[in-house]
Image (cartoon, rainbow, N blue to C red):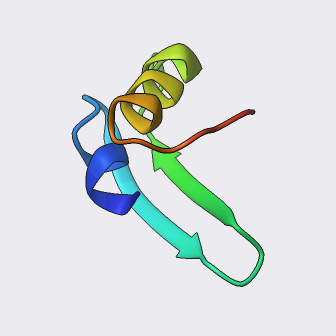
Amino acid sequence: MQAALETVDGVEDVEIDYSKKTATVTCKAGTKAKDLITALEDGGYGGSI
């Protein structure tokens, strides 16, 4: 999951909490939420914001 999110342009940091099944993503202004979800789906994960 972390590797998938890190492929998105603008992502600066990813913290995964596997026990809560959440990710906290720090990214530059202009990074699109749609791109984060697409990266997760392409990596075989689901996601929502």
Describe residue 2's horizontal placement relative to residue 17 as left or right.
left
Q: Quadrant of residue 22?
A: bottom right
Q: Residue at x 31, y 33 (%)?
A: 10
Vertical order, 16 against 13 (above or below): below
Nearest the eye: 10 or 18: 18
Vertical order, 13 against 41 (above or below): below
- Quarter of the picture containing the N terminus is bottom left
Q: Position of residue 16 (x, y in %)?
A: 54, 71
Q: Position of residue 44 (x, y in %)?
A: 41, 42
Describe residue 39's horizontal placement relative to residue 18 as left or right.
left
Vertical order, 22 against 6 (above or below): below
Nearest the eye: 43 or 24: 43
Q: Position of residue 30 (x, y in %)?
A: 46, 16
Describe residue 47's horizontal placement relative to residue 10 as left or right.
right
Q: Residue furthest front?
A: 44
**Number of numbered discs overlaid on the protein picture:** 0
Q: Residue at x 50, y 51 (%)?
A: 26
Q: Residue furthest bottom?
A: 19
Q: Position of residue 6 (x, y in %)?
A: 28, 48
Q: Quadrant of residue 11?
A: top left
Q: Residue at x 53, y 27 (%)?
A: 37
Q: Residue at x 26, y 56 (%)?
A: 3
Q: Quadrant of residue 49?
A: top right
